[in-house]
Image (cartoon, helix red, strand yellow):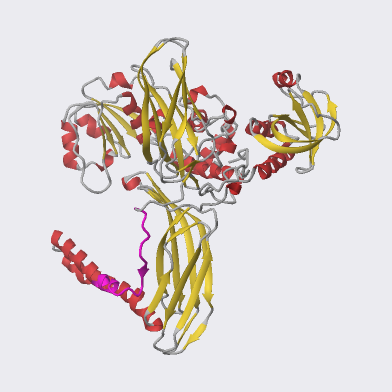
């Protein structure tokens, strides 16, 4: 670990930094139970709805991990729109950007579909004959669930200096506690400050953890 | 839960030189018979922080293919090449770490994986990191592009839509305006300017030297000449319209080489600039989403007039220095070797300073049980250098946790005083040294295991 400023916090890195796609899927705390069966129906559509920063893409990545053979298509804001492959289920990210002719093609094709969108597609999907199930990620999370999500990030970056080797925990469930794990009260503070925008919370915590690492402080402030 | 566990032991915990092989052992323990399609060990680097994660594979080897029997504990030595660049770097938004990763590919189960970080020292920036020749306000050809560029752009745009022809003159006027503002106006005051920086490839501790000279063609006034050295971390996260760029200025130093002065027509003006870079500098880095940029800007400040500027982009490499200022600041080797790259120098306190900080935090929270427990949990297992005068043998101090009391009750406890830290400590040995006696000076490494609130002393266990 050398002189890593994170080592003194018993961390291998800032837990709230950007994650690689695989790790994001690994650490996603999303309830996907029953969705596999839902997506076995031929004209089913799963809509993940919410504003940016609330975990739509994380849901898709977690699903992609469960369904590794499903193609994932990302629609960029500008530039050429990607072609949608014929395989189903198909995971479509940023579906609100799909232009009308591509949308027509998408809805005419076979199901099932999984879309992440800022705009509600329920009516469109129902008109095209899909049975729609919506996960609204914009709804406020319970403090307990948010606490679990955030502490999972901390535990995944934890390391034990006594072991002589720096190891990042492959399975966050292996570790059950870290001195910097957030308390429920701290999470409630975060929710009051950032609402249910998880990305905003993560960015805020990144700065807090960075300050801890740089100043050599060992505890999070009681009130974040 | 996987049926086997992997551990990586490196032969040396010291920092490695770029390109130097790294060796160690992968230890595999299996609870039951396991078929492994490949046990692969890899050396790689990875960025972490605010920006998108970027990785570079350096070397890899397959150590084993076959079946492990239940209860076996097997060792697989390895030797891998390390990267030549980038060096290990810990910044605010951008970090670079080097890892040895071992992963067993086991069919139909989660592949057990382990990784160890090791520090890498690199002092030579790669050839593809090229310093950019200055964007000069007096460049002979650049002015032409301020006119030609917008016109070409306008024509291209007009090709897509006839309506753009309406905007063509507008765009040309804006482009011409920028050129006039940035190029023509400053030169009317300064005349042609010659501005050079001696070396665009530098290392930490080097002195930057620059010259700036000009001969004004008419009488005027300048507010001064300043040079600014700037180092900035820049990273981007997300992609497409969700892409966000973050910047953090690591260093911004301005050197004023000339004060306000009157310029007489035809009288040559000349000034020199010198700036010594810190010895521990952030290295220039250039990946897709993570960068560390160094630049030097020369500026002639002209009152109520656009300033004349020229920007030089530098390539900065870490310094090769003596091991006295090695990774952990202990300087155990007398052999000349490069010091570790690129942390922010004031950020990571030395072990001594760190110990004092920890003691300060313990004293601060000594009377609040919850924060005290938090600080103790945070520092548990860390070793600190300690010099203390032993006073007398004492009974095992009180611990809040019964298990801890039981664990340390077998140890030999002594009251001691550390002058260096101005702190009383209770020091324990499981096997006390023979020379232990009241008044003896002890120096070594010890770990904090608790805090005696009544006696106001830190409970420490000697580790080496």
Q: Is residue B379 magenta?
A: no
**As rendered, which of B354 and A121 lies closer to the eye?**
B354
**As rendered, which of B46 and B445 lies closer to the eye?**
B445
Whole-percent x, y for residue B319 in the image = 51, 53
Q: Seen in the image, is B388 located left or right of residue B370?
A: right
**As rendered, which of B257 and A21 lies closer to the eye?**
B257
Residue under the point 46% across and 56% down: B232
* Quarter holding residue B106: top left
Residue under the point 18% across and 42% down: A100
Vertical comparison of A83 with A131: above or below: below
* Quarter holding residue B129: bottom left
Magenta: predominant secondary structure element? loop
* Quarter holding residue B43: top left
Q: Which residues are magenta?
A: B128-147
Q: Farthest residue toward the front? A: B335
Q: Seen in the image, is A160 located left or right of residue B372?
A: left
Q: Is residue B129 magenta?
A: yes
């Amino acid at each position: 670990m050398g002189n890593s400023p994170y080592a003194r916090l018993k961390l291998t890195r800032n837990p709230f930094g950007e994650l690689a796609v695989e790790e994001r899927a690994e650490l996603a705390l999303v309830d996907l139970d029953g969705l596999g069966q839902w997506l076995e129906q031929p004209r089913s559509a799963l809509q993940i709805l919410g504003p940016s920063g609330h975990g739509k893409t994380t849901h898709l990545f977690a699903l992609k991990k469960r369904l590794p053979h499903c193609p994932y298509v990302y629609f960029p804001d500008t530039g050429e729109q990607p072609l949608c492959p014929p395989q189903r289920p198909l995971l479509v990210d940023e579906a609100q950007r799909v232009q009308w002719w591509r949308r027509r093609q998408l809805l005419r094709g076979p199901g099932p579909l999984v879309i992440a969108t800022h705009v509600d597609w329920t009516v469109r999907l129902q008109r095209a004959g899909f049975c729609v199930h919506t996960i609204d990620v914009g709804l406020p999370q319970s403090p307990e669930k948010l606490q679990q999500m955030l502490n999972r990030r901390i535990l995944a970056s934890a390391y034990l200096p006594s072991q002589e080797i720096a190891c990042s925990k492959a399975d966050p469930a292996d570790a059950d506690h870290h001195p910097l794990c957030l308390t429920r009260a701290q999470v409630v503070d975060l929710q009051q400050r950032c609402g249910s925008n998880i990305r905003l919370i993560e960015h805020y915590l990144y700065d807090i953890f960075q300050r801890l690492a740089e100043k050599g402080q060992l505890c999070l402030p009681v009130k974040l | 839960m996987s049926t086997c566990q992997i551990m990586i032991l490196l032969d040396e915990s010291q920092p490695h030189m770029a390109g130097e092989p790294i060796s160690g052992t992968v230890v595999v323990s299996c609870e039951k018979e396991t078929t492994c399609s490949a046990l692969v060990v890899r050396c790689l680097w990875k960025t972490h922080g605010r920006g998108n994660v970027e990785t570079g594979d350096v070397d890899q080897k397959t150590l084993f293919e076959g079946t492990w029997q239940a209860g076996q504990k097997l060792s697989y030595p390895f030797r891998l090449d390390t990267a030549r660049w980038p060096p290990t770097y810990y910044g605010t938004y951008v970090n670079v770490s080097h890892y040895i990763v071992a992963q067993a590919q086991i069919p139909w189960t989660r592949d057990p994986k382990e990784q160890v970080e090791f520090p890498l020292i690199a002092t030579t920036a790669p050839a593809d990191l090229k310093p950019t020749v200055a964007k000069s306000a007096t460049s002979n050809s650049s002015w032409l592009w301020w006119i030609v560029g917008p016109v070409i752009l306008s024509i291209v745009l007009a090709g897509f839509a006839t309506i753009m022809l309406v905007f063509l003159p507008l765009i040309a006027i804006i482009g011409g305006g920028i050129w006039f503002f940035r190029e023509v106006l400053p030169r009317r005051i300064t005349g042609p300017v010659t501005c050079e920086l001696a070396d665009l490839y530098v290392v930490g501790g080097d002195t930057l030297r620059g010259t700036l000279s000009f001969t004004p063609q008419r009488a005027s006034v300048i507010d001064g000449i300043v040079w600014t050295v700037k180092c900035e971390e820049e990273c981007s996260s997300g992609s497409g319209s969700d892409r966000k760029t973050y910047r953090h200025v690591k260093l911004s130093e301005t050197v004023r080489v000339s004060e306000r002065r009157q310029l007489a027509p035809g009288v040559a003006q000349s000034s020199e600039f010198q700036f010594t870079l810190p010895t521990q500098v952030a290295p220039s880095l250039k990946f897709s989403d993570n960068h560390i940029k160094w630049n030097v800007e020369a500026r002639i400040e002209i009152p109520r007039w656009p300033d004349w500027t020229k920007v030089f982009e530098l390539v900065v490499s870490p310094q090769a220095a003596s091991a006295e200022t090695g990774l952990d600041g202990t300087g155990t080797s007398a052999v000349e070797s490069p010091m570790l790259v690129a942390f922010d120098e004031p950020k990571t306190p030395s072990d001594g300073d760190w110990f004092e900080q920890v003691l300060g935090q313990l004293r601060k929270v000594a009377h609040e049980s919850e924060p005290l427990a938090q600080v103790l949990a945070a520092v548990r297992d860390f070793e600190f250098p300690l010099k203390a005068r032993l006073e007398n043998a004492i009974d095992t101090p009180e611990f809040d946790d019964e298990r801890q009391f039981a664990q340390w009750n077998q140890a030999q406890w002594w009251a001691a005083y550390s002058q260096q830290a101005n702190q009383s400590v209770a020091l324990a040995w499981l096997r006390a040294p023979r020379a232990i006696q009241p008044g003896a000076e002890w120096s070594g490494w010890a770990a904090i295991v608790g805090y005696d609130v009544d006696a106001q002393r830190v409970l420490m266990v000697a580790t080496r």
